[in-house]
Image (cartoon, rainbow, N blue to C red):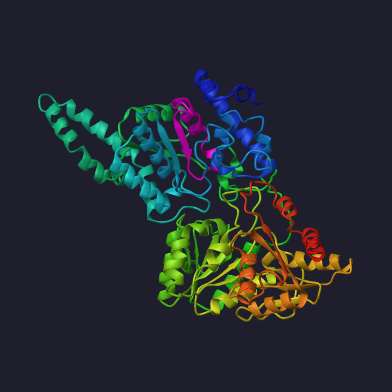
């Protein structure tokens, strides 16, 4: 039953509820989130952990006049339900339905779109300064997790906020986790803070005891009060936030609604930047998520009663193939080390961590640091492999260029979740890595056609004297035999998979198998397509590409990447350099993801829509032949 939730059309309706109704509402929110995510998949544990915090925020503040910015945004399901989206909630993460993250076009209460971590404080500070310049008096609140606080950008925001001194409230949602369990000195620091309430109890006890001493007691108590800051620094390791210019409140129980509201009301009255430290439990209210918050961070559909996540395929994922291959290679070469940015499970590195615990480095949500840390390891003689999702590697662009490529250091970038990622939507699509990597000097840019070539390319990359990247998609592998008996790689060499003289289909990565299937369809129409597995985006096999263009007169490039700056662009550059552009040159079409923002929805739906299927490639080839 969701009787109370169904009566909530916006945050204003929360303010009329009594304590008993609020407790019931929290239970209804959790049940709705669990039942929905069990059908759609999504970010479960993080959203369950902030139910009471979300209720308190919307009772204390006046959204959307007051601005609440959610860092990352995967914990906003309760926020969506409390801001008038209950009836659409069943469409969560489905094409045309609700986004799994804050989305400005979806609701006036979604103040700022997020999806990558550590951005909320900077965005909130910008809004606070804009408010001050306009003479406004509304409140600005940034809700950031302890995992996101490991990102350097969060501290950049804290640093400036403390300097400027504007009214700003930062709520630190401390659940001891990001996706993998949090690591590092900051995590240890927050762990100590969670034990800090003993300081406040001790101070009150001492003051009460001293005040009870006749005549001298009150004076001694005042003296103690004057040195309280020194005592606090000795007993409560919370000074870092105050040194940055924040008033620190907490830590408090993030599941006690009355206490949360009291603390947030207090924060509203304090001038200048305030940090409210809230301790929550990830997965709260669902036993399976409480016991295994990593597994239930972003599960697919699952059985509510048993917690069994639906297995869509018995085949391994590309991430698992990568992790197993890296472990095998590391067993033979002790120089190989692995680096992840809070994604040990997601990038398939659990086997490596178990086998080589001292050679696996989880740096937290800090992609920039991960890349430069790898550069340092490489400069000292090791062979680091940095496993990061394509969308998150964007955050380390400068470090890849400046610290790895310009120094020509042997760092291997394992670019996971490349291409269309599906239900996580626009902030997570891995559609830009060819473009942002191929412009860099010295780097070798590869994409395996399947799981067999992934293993070969990883070994090849680790033998190169300079930087290399290999990108592979989200999801399960093909499960098919190798495409070619020729497993060896030669730098910058493509492979002709099928002969043909009517046109050349030059495919890269996971589009090679659909291109071969398209060639079969075309053969039924009497069109004989030459199919080339490009393998390399940089250095590109100019000789093979130019020969195919001259001999067939028609070229179709295929990639699961945006059109601008991608593999097709590299082919066009090669043809232009060879004097084969303009009138009289070969007909060329680049089949890719169009220059548009790709929303959330099933990956297969978008591949069909963009023509990145066997039938879509065949249709594009027929059109090219007709021209």
> What x and y, as percent, mark residue 155?
37, 49
User: Seen from this angle, which residue lies furthest front?
Assistant: 583
> What x and y, as percent, mark residue 530?
78, 74
Residue at the (30%, 41%) spot, across then down: 164
- The quarter in which the C terminus is drawn is bottom right
Quarter where residue 444 is shown: bottom right
> What x and y, as percent, mark residue 517?
80, 66
Q: Which residues are magenta?
A: 48-74
The vertical placement of 493 against 165, above or below, is: below
Residue 88 visible? The answer is yes
Out of 428 and 574, give the one closest to the viewer.
574
Residue at the (51%, 37%) spot, across then down: 50
Q: Is residue 58 magenta?
A: yes
User: Seen from this angle, which residue lies furthest left?
Assistant: 215
Out of 553 and 29, give the one closest to the viewer.
553
Quarter where residue 90 is shown: top right
């Amino acid at each position: 039953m969701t009787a109370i939730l169904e009566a909530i059309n916006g945050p204003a309706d929360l303010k009329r509820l009594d304590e008993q109704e609020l407790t019931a509402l929290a239970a209804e929110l959790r049940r709705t989130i669990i039942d929905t995510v069990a059908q759609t998949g999504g970010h479960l544990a993080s959203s369950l952990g902030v139910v009471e915090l979300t209720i308190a925020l919307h009772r204390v503040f006046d959204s959307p006049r007051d601005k609440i910015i959610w860092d990352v945004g995967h914990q906003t399901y309760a926020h969506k339900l409390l801001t008038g989206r209950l009836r659409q909630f069943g469409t969560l993460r489905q094409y045309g339905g609700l986004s799994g993250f804050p989305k400005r076009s979806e609701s006036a209460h979604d103040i700022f779109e997020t999806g990558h971590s550590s951005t909320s404080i900077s965005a909130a500070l910008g809004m606070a300064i804009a408010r001050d310049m306009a003479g406004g008096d509304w409140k600005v609140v940034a809700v950031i997790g302890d995992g996101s606080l490991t990102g350097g950008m969060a501290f950049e925001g804290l640093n400036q906020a403390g300097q400027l001194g504007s009214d700003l409230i930062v709520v630190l949602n401390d659940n001891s986790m990001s996706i993998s369990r949090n690591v590092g000195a900051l995590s240890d620091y927050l762990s100590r803070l969670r034990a800090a309430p003993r300081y406040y109890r001790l101070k009150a006890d001492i003051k009460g005891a001293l005040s009870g001493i006749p005549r001298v007691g009150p004076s001694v108590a005042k003296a103690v009060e004057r040195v309280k800051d020194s005592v606090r620094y000795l007993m409560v390791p919370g000074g870092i936030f105050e040194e940055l210019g924040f008033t620190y409140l907490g830590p408090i129980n993030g599941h006690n609604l009355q206490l949360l509201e009291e603390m947030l009301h207090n924060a509203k009255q304090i001038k200048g930047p305030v940090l409210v430290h809230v301790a929550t439990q990830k997965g709260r209210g669902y036993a399976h998520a409480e016991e295994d918050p990593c597994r239930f961070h972003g599960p697919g559909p699952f059985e509510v009663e048993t917690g069994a996540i639906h297995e869509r395929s018995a085949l391994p994922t590309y991430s698992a193939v990568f992790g197993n291959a890296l472990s095998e290679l590391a067993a033979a070469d002790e120089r190989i080390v692995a680096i992840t940015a809070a994604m040990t499970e997601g990038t398939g590195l659990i086997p490596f961590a178990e086998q080589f615990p001292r050679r696996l480095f989880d740096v937290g949500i800090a992609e920039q640091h991960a890349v430069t840390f790898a550069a340092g390891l490489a400069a000292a003689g090791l062979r680091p492999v940095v496993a990061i999702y394509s969308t998150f590697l964007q955050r380390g662009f400068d470090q890849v260029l400046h610290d790895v490529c310009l120094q020509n250091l042997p760092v291997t970038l394992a670019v996971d979740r490349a291409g269309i990622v599906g239900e996580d939507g626009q902030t997570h699509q891995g559609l830009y890595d060819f473009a942002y990597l191929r412009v860099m000097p010295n780097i070798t840019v590869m994409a395996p056609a399947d799981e067999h070539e992934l293993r070969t390319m990883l070994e090849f990359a680790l033998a190169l004297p300079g930087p290399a990247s290999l990108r592979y998609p989200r999801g399960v592998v093909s499960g098919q035999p190798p495409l070619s008996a020729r497993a060896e790689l030669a730098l910058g060499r493509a492979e002709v998979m099928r002969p043909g003289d009517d046109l050349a289909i030059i495919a890269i990565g996971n589009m090679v198998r659909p291109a071969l299937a398209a060639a079969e369809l075309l053969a039924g129409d009497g069109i004989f397509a030459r199919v080339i597995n490009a393998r390399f985006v940089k250095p590109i096999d100019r000789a093979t590409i130019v020969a195919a263009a001259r001999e067939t007169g028609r070229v179709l490039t295929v990639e699961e990447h945006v059109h601008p700056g991608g593999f097709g662009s590299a082919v066009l550059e090669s043809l232009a350099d060879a004097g084969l552009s303009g009138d009289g040159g070969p007909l060329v079409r680049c089949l890719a993801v169009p220059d548009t923002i790709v929303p959330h929805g099933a990956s297969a739906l978008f591949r069909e829509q963009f023509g990145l299927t066997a039938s879509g490639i065949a249709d594009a080839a027929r059109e090219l032949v007709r021209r």
